[in-house]
Image: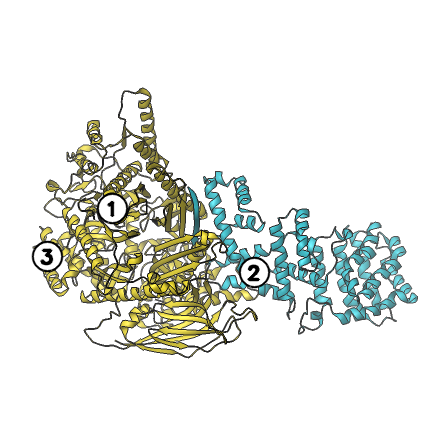
Amino acid sequence: MPGKLKVKIVAGRHLPVMDRASDLTDAFVEVKFGNTTFKTDVYHKSLNPQWNSEWFKFEVDDEDLQDEPLQITVLDHDTYSANDAIGKVYIDIDPLLYSEAATVISGWFPIYDTIHGIRGEINVVVKVDLFNDLNRFRQSSCGVKFFCTTSIPKCYRAVIIHGFVEELVVNEDPEYQWIDRIRTPRASNEARQRLISLMSGELQRKIGLKVLEMRGNAVVGYLQCFDLEGESGLVVRAIGTACTLDKLSSPAAFLPACNSPSKEMKESPLVHPPSHGCRSTHNSPIHTATGSRLTQNFSVSVPTLIYTGMGSGSAGKEGGPFKGLLRQQTQSALEQREFPFFTLTAFPPGFLVHVGGVVSARSVKLLDRIHNPDEPETRDAWWAEIRQEIKSHAKALGCHAVVGYSESTSICEEVCILSASGTAAVLNPRFLQDGTVEGCLEQRLEENLPAGCGFCHIPYDELNMPFPAHLTYCYNCRKQKVPDVLFTTIDLPMDATVIGKGCLIQARLCRLKKKAQAEANATAISNLLPFMEYEVHTQLMNKLKLKGMNALFGLRIQISVGENMLMGLASATGVYLAALPTPGGIQIAGKTPNDGSYEQHISHMQKKINDTIAKNKELYEINPPEISEELIGSPIPEPRQRSRLLRSQSESSDEVMELDLSHGKKDAFVLEIDDTDAMEDVHSLLTDVPPPSGFYSCNTEIMPGINNWTSEIQMFTSVRVIRLSSLNLTNQALNKNFNDLCENLLKSLYFKLRSMIPCCLCHVNFTVSLPEDELIQVTVTAVAITFDKNQALQTTKTHVEKSLQRASTDNEELLQFPLELCSDSLPPHPFPPVKEHLESASSNSGIPAAQRATSVDYSSFADRCSSWIELIKLKAQTIRRGSIKTTVTVEKASPMGEGNFRNRAGPSCANSTVGVVKMTPLSFIPGAKITKYLGIINMFFIRETTSLREEGGVSGFLHAFIAEVFAMVRAHVAALGGNAVVSYIMKQCVFMENPNKNQAQCLINVSGDAVVFVRESESEVVPTQHPTANCQPACPGGEVTT
Amino acid sequence: MTSELDIFVGNTTLIDEDVYRLWLDGYSVSDAVALRVRSGILEQTGATAAVLQSDTMDHYRTFHMLERLLHAPPKLLHQLIYQIPPSRQALLIERYYTFDEAFVREVLGKKLSKGTKKDLDDISTKTGITLKSCRRQFDNFKRVFKVVEEMRGSLVDNIQQHFLLSDRLARDYAAIVFFANNRFETGKKKLQYLSFGDFAFCAELMIQHWTLGAVDSQVDDMDVDLDKEFLQDLKELKVLVADKDLLDLHKSLVCTALRGKLGVFSEMEANFKNLSRGLVNVAAKLTHNKDVRDLFVDLVEKFVEPCRSDHWPLGDVRLFLNQYSASVHSLDGFRFQALWDRYMGTLRGCLLRLYHE
């Protein structure tokens, strides 16, 4: 499927002065794709050149289209000497390769130079003509859609979720090639940027091929990372979940499907509670295996085989689907099925049956030079090994799949820690095969079932547990067994019943290690790892209890390696699941009970802890209904051997556990403070300050217990680097420093965002690295979302309903709420005229039928009354936006030239949203509906300076760079015709400095999904906007961007 | 444990108005932190001093990066690096260009050159405004001056277009530019009682009536330079005081009209010739640059002070000036009615503003 790539260079603006004499620039542009280069004419003496070039046409095959970035270089013409480069723009043309995404890339792109940063902007138009080609042996995978979002994208429906895809490519790092000694830093940076861009393209293409092989058409939860292995090379690797997605385009396709669910219900055994009693779930938070020096891990199951085995009761009934499975299995390459992993963290309703617990595996490797980049077998083998381990761990938990799966590395010199983690789970097989999934329909059915507790039930056999756990009957349905705590890496399932609100819980840990070389170093690290895992786990457990909660979601444990220390940082969102038992308190035990003052001290501490728990319960509104013990049945008498099991790995004594038992109180968690270490722990427990009132935080997509988001969002990145002072550091001092660093960072965030109160920090993502001996770097990306306090106290029931609604990909179920809302506020406007307006608007607009259908669909359901105004406004905005593709900011700016300024400065900034690109790490935008996915944004930048002081020191340098990265992301999204990036993530932020040489360098890798969103009706807008006034201008020629 | 690096970057650039004000006022980070602590913010928010320090640093860094763009406000609107809502952009610009009354009175009418810049130290000491803030304000004046100095079209519009200021602020800048260009003396001791607003008011009247732009809107410098031809012609007015008959006639016309209406009639009658001579001589002298510069000094000396020493109420001054200008129309031998109106119309407005009871 070869294609023709067409590029037009329109104009430049704000170029830097390149000729000191005239204070002007003679700029021209080189457009390069693959090995072909075109040039524009030189536009003399201007900082705002108008090239208005012809269309430069590149005839290329689609393999190149996928791999290569379009490279645009702006230069200053110099008659006598070499032309000076002003900067470059790399444009990933991948979004143009799938039919539903963008059709043109057109807009102002910042011109970027790795030494000077952004230097002006250039207006470019890019188009691709693809020729169809039925070659079966093609190497390209054009048309496979990629999504960073770790759930089924909002305007799609999952037909089949095929499973895990992974790939990696390796190359030599240009920075370490011999030529780097003689070339300029700029040339070297550009070589790196270009190489990574190429490798990303190649990787995406290869993954796409695998997806096609599996008969899928999309990759969801696509996560691409690069490992800078230094001397030994550069690895770009990616994982994702292959799916077959259907675009939800019209209600017609949707409605008939609604009729079938009941029938389907009968066929699908897994929706019913299994008849043969409980499968065990396994709360075990973290299951560690020691073993080889490489590892500790957990893994998951192969879905297909296991489903048959596991669904004991169900296998028979499931004949049909099973055949489907078999067929599918034979069709797809076997390796693809090798790992039943899913990078998704949120699922279509009914997909997730049971959750076992977190499984993770780590392995320490020594890096060696990659000899043959075309055969990256070593790296492949390393990951395969880890995944195997994860798989076996999951199996041990009675689970067949791993969800919320992710992989990461930490590299220091030649040592590399590979980590993988996920949540062992039992899945509903219907989603894994052809034609049986009607994702969005099922939730309604499920509502008939006892409210979501199913996923908490243990998937493993009670009598044959992989590890001892403390089981009780589910507090919700009273039929199945549940664990006392549940740790997972996924988002809170939408149907889960939660009491109160959630909160961010972090465990932070440092361990010193001796500096060593190679093997010795690797051994030292792998010896330390189990202790770290154990301690991180203990901390999480303590903090969870202290909050009075019983489950963790979104758990992410990061272990980073440095020259002389290891750091562990675990973040998760704690919640109180109604199905799980009330957590016991924390009991403190001293070792020397005879000492009176000591006892007093202990009891003082105990009181403090109890107070804190009580306070937290109040703060997070945790007041579960009282249930008498008898009803629940006695817990399975299997006390805390699990802890003992884990403990036995550490040096700390087993007596602790004895004490625990002797204390007798079965659900109390005992902390022994027999040494300073433990004392520290207790102190640090109590020093974690809760966020100021009006603030909540979590690291999951949404905050359990808050459902009335308003539309204001603020995404941010904050970076801190501290230098540890003394030479003879102790573990305690380190821990304290690290703890303070994180706590202060959070406090700063709360302070900075105080104007948004009441608000919630969502998707708080901490990353720790150890760039040098005494440096600790913490990077946080999160989004602050405001919510409406007045409705904040709605019951969990409403919460469940609401989130169901949001999840459902269409509006149908939105019906009740918005109607109620708006019938109050808009009594004089009955429905029929409204509809008329809308329809005339959409029929006038000359948009393709399918798109129009969407808009009708939108109008004819649900919240039409309150939303139509908004819709019309949006249309009006869309019209204004019409030209955004080429001139986003110009448009926005131009009115200010004249006297309009005063109006704009005044309180009415009505059109302020035009041209704004929102960024969020979440998969949705509160108060808005995503109407189109335009493609994946995956960008890599290097910035270097040799005048660090002049640029405001390290802070000034990095601040400017991150701002520039945001700007470039926004510009690309705007050029694709989008107005937001969702599932945005800063995957890497590698910062190196050399203050003595006045130098610094930083590498940043970001990704996300470019989307178009339209605002849903906002009730507060309704009273103020007069509908007819809005309607008139909107109707003629309104274009709805769907 | 020392913090090496500490940044916060939002997709929407956060602007804290209070910190912005402190930054504009030229406080160092540590002073700003101290002032914020004093404002009680720590108690309100439960933050620590370290948090405040970090927050202040961060905002200062942002402002520092934005400053380059604020020098050419349209750039702030077009740039892609900082996503700032329009209302915030407007606030940033408006505040950046806002100046202190105390400061502007010190430099109004002075040449905006390097020499003056050296005096900023003294101004800073005298006014208590930080040197940094003085520099910013001075540089703003100079920058606006440079940009609009040679431009066609309305001065206020030009300023608004190139600096996106509010109407009020643009008018103030027009006055500053006009004064700087014509180098009117405003610093003399006897002018100290006048506020910037008084001068700005006069500047506006003069721009509207006395500049080239008042006659022809197609010339360069139309609003910043006084109409030279007009100033030359003003010599013709001398006849009003040089011709004794004309002067007497003028006086009698005014006195007849105002008899019984003026509380200070006798003083007026006694002073008429002096006042009239003063006003006409000011006009006749405007051919020399030096005398143009002293316009306000002369007006105060020749008119405002004599009236004030006789305790004229403002209403009487108004009555007098109205009658004084109007009566000229009845002087048959006087041929320069239009010229007189152009001169006196503006002057009357200025004098009334300059006259503080």
A235 left or right, relative to B349:
left
- Disc 2 designates what residue? B71
Identified by mark 3, the residue type is Glu
Marks 2, 3 in one chain: no
| Quadrant for the C terminus of chain A in the image | bottom left
Image location of residue A338, percent across then percent down: 15, 58
In this view, the residue in front, A522 or A860, is A522
Image location of residue A233, percent across then percent down: 29, 60
Subunit under mark 2? B
> Between tags 3 and 1, which lies in front?
1
> Between tags 2 and 3, which lies in front?
2
Chain rendered cyan: B
- Disc 1 designates what residue? A520
Identified by mark 1, the residue type is Ala
Residue A249, by quadrant, is: bottom left
- Disc 3 designates what residue? A318
Chain rendered yellow: A
Secondary structure beneath label 3: loop
Q: What residue is at 90 percent from the left and 66 percent from the top?
A: B242
Q: How is the image coloured?
A: by chain
- Measured in 3D between alpha carbons, the distance from the residue under mark 1 to the one under mark 2, in whole angstroms, is 58 Å
Taking the view exactly as shown, the residue that stands out farthest to the left is: A316
